[in-house]
Image (cartoon, coloured by chain):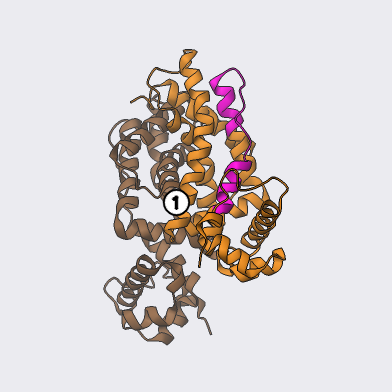
Chain colours: A brown, B orange
Amino acid sequence: MRDKRFHRAEPGTVRPGGRTARVRAAVLRTAGDILVEQGFGGFDLADVARRAEVGKTTVYRRWGSVTGLVADLLADMAEQSLPREETGSVLGDLRANAVLVRRTLADPRQGALFRAVIAAATCDERTAQALRRFYEVRVAEWAPCVEQGVARGELPVGTDAEEVVRAVSAPLYHQLLTTGVVPDAPAAERAARAAHAAAVAGVYVG
Amino acid sequence: MRDKRFHRAEPGTVRPGGRTARVRAAVLRTAGDILVEQGFGGFDLADVARRAEVGKTTVYRRWGSVTGLVADLLADMAEQSLPREETGSVLGDLRANAVLVRRTLADPRQGALFRAVIAAATCDERTAQALRRFYEVRVAEWAPCVEQGVARGELPVGTDAEEVVRAVSAPLYHQLLTTGVVPDAPAAERAARAAHAAAVAGVYVG
């Protein structure tokens, strides 16, 4: 029933602007809309197909299941995310990262989407894997700013770059998930400075 | 229909070992079991009553709804949580806090329970409020260790004690929720040292 070739858009299989790309864009946009409006509870492939004005058979053949569609939504979000900034100092770069993470969580659509996906990941292994992969892509994108900081002598040799990047995100996600309050700009500044201070002190060497 | 007097156990209304306390204990234990086994999806007051061997009417009258029961479960977890430790140094105290948070998340029952409740809080306001209250109680319990650290001159004057305590928990929750991997002992040690280094650097002043 499910055609593996179409399950995920592999590089080369999607011509930008082609029908396959248009269908994927429409389906992912609709899937995001529904997740934001109703969370995972109201999520149903037939409903996505109807609202996206795409054939039900196409949606079932290409994504197979709700979790397959959410996995592709996260892959698309990782692809669409902004590239890292280079400000010339590791503190500046971590600050740029914190601002970006905060903006994502504060965005009504993306913030709601993340909450829905994180909730679903707590009880669905495939969504959890897709979420893990999303963060791996984002952390790998920003890790070089820490490596450059080490090379410039701003941070101790042996600093675990990915740990530092995760440390910037952690308090912002933690605040949103445990208090429901979207982190503000001072919270992003604190997150960047805290990760930087801990890295300078050698906490992430190891 | 709902009797406000019995909705939450107020001090004085529950004789330890009395029938009311026994019913509450049985219902909360069963509610926890079901959340751990099935998450929020399979959660139903009638099922809780049946498995706890408590009258359905009693459960509906006292807790009113699934979210009312989860709110009481969180209140009970806050009451049952261990008191803070005093080790004589703020780093030692933050380390004790990190070890406790890690153990809670690593515990098969409590870890699963937190994941289920955090997931539910993303889409239910009453559960979100109960979760917020749980963290307020826990953060208030540990904040004095930071205040004592300030008084002893280990941390800068004006350090926001609650921010420091939250900073210890943040990377541990973040790791569990975004990667699904239970934080290990070195992660707890890193979380304590990172919060301490950032506090020493004055990140949480103001």
Q: Nearer the viewer, residue B76 or A28?
A: B76
What is the x, y in percent for residue A173? 42, 47
Vertical side of A48 occupied by B20: above or below: above
User: Is there any visible trace of residue A200 in the rendered image?
Assistant: no
User: Does A153 appear in magenta?
Assistant: no
B61 with respect to A63 (left or right): right
Q: Nearer the viewer, residue B192 or A81?
A: B192
Q: Quadrant of the C terminus of chain A?
A: top right
Q: Nearer the viewer, residue B113 or A147?
A: B113
Q: Secondary structure at mark 1?
A: helix
User: Does B91 appear in magenta?
Assistant: yes
Residue projecting furthest to the top = B153
The residue at 67%/68% (across/down) is B55
Q: Amino acid at mark 1?
A: Gln
Vertical side of A2 occupied by B9: above or below: above
B140 with respect to A183 (left or right): right
Provide the major secondary structure of the magenta segment: helix
User: Is there any visible trace of residue B78 in the rendered image?
Assistant: yes
The residue at 32%/70% (across/down) is A29
Find disc 1 in the rendering and name its residue.
B129
Instruction: Identify the chain of the residue marked 1, using the numbered disc in the image.
Output: B
Q: Which residues are magenta?
A: B72-97
What is the x, y in percent for residue B36? 64, 59
Asked which quadrant contains residue B33, the reply is bottom right
